[in-house]
Image (tube, helix red, strand yellow):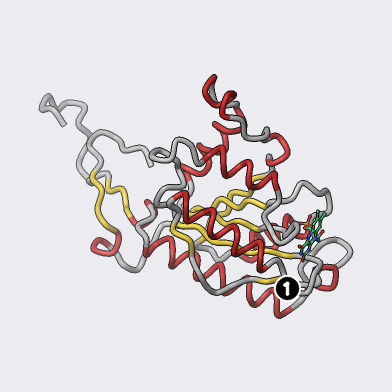
């Protein structure tokens, strides 16, 4: 959050515990598939998000190149810079991952690898994050979710453990228009979103801070420095 000259930052909890700014969540689905269940899960999350959660849905995963250290040394490609900026601006990142052979799809892993470098300056460092997922199998992508949690731990992200969202047999949970219609899955998702707001606030998301542009009169005629 850019700070203006003369702006004072006050922890919200001390200033006005009743009025939080919304938590900004960047939501990333790890699938390139046109009719992706995980992208649909993110859309459902955006629709169901409580008023205190502002969702920024990332839809550029297909533009992300494979990770290549030589390319990085020559300069990070624009899609990488754009994603880094969006992670920086977010108070938390929500990942919805498919499961590919018990693991995280390569496109999502590539994107995380790009933004994880250099490790001391990755925008994921200290960033609250959480993982949900849908798969057509009976386990609801649980193994990929565990693998993704491990990856995020290495980046220094603060990964929320529970409540989990495991949307199994996904073709039964979404309708033909890819709307999440399963009540139990919707309940899991709603709980997860509420917990993510608390998690982001607990871990010092910038939204916990309030800019108080100290209600002073305009300084136009005032020659004293601010
Ligand atoms: C290469 C590949 C490997 C897969 N491996 C698994 C798996 O290990 N476990 C599982 O539950 N589903 C697996 N699936 C099925 C996916 O869960 C299913 O395709 C899901 O819809 C993918 O997510 P999406 O709809 O968001 O693209 C696999 C699919 C592909 C294409």
Of all residues shown, which one is farthest toward the bottom? 184
Give left or right: position of 112 versus 225.
right
Instruction: Tell me what residue is drawn at x 65 percent, y 77 percent.
Output: 187
Give left or right: position of 162 versus 119.
right
* Residue 179, above or below 220: below
- Residue 60, image x, y percentages: 68, 39
Instruction: Tell me what residue is drawn at x 45 percent, y 52 percent.
Output: 91
Give left or right: position of 18 versus 87.
left
* Residue 60, above or below 202: above
Q: Label 1 belongs to which residue?
A: 139
Quadrant location of residue 102?
bottom right
Quadrant location of residue 219?
top left
Quadrant the N terminus occupies: top left
Quadrant the C terminus occupies: top left
- Residue 111, image x, y percentages: 61, 41
Of all residues shown, which one is farthest toward the top? 74
Closer to us: 188 or 74: 74
The residue at label 1 has a CB less than 8 Å from ligand 1: yes
- Residue 195, image x, y percentages: 50, 70
Instruction: Tell me what residue is drawn at x 37 percent, y 65 percent.
Output: 202
Q: Quarter for ligand 1? A: bottom right
Closer to us: 23 or 195: 195
- Residue 190, image x, y percentages: 60, 72
* Residue 61, above or below 74: below
Instruction: Tell me what residue is drawn at x 68 percent, y 63 percent.
Output: 133
Q: Residues within 10 Å of mark 1 (few under 14, many from 20)?
A: some
Of all residues shown, which one is farthest toward the left? 224
Give left or right: position of 122 versus 115.
left
Mark 1, secondary structure of its residue: loop
Q: Total number of numbered labels?
A: 1
């Amino acid at each position: 959050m850019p700070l203006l000259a003369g702006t004072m930052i006050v922890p919200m909890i001390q200033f006005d515990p009743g009025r939080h700014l919304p938590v900004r969540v960047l939501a990333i689905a790890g699938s390139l598939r046109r009719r992706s269940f995980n992208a649909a899960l993110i859309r459902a999350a955006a629709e169901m998000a409580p008023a205190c959660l502002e969702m920024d849905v990332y839809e550029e995963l297909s533009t992300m190149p494979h990770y290549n250290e030589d390319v990085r040394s020559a300069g990070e490609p624009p899609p990488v810079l754009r994603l880094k900026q969006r992670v920086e601006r977010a108070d938390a990142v929500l990942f919805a991952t498919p499961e590919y052979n018990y693991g995280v799809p390569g496109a999502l892993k590539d994107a995380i690898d790009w933004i994880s470098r250099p490790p001391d300056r990755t925008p994921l460092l200290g960033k609250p994050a959480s993982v949900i997922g849908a798969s057509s199998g009976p386990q609801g992508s649980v193994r990929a979710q565990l693998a993704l949690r491990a990856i995020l731990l290495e980046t220094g992200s603060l990964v929320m453990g529970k409540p989990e969202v495991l949307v199994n047999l996904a073709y039964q949970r979404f309708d033909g228009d890819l709307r999440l219609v399963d009540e139990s899955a919707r309940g899991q998702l709603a709980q997860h979103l509420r917990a993510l707001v608390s998690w982001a606030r607990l871990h010092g998301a910038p939204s916990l801070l309030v800019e108080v542009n100290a209600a002073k009169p305009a300084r136009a005629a005032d020659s004293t420095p601010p």
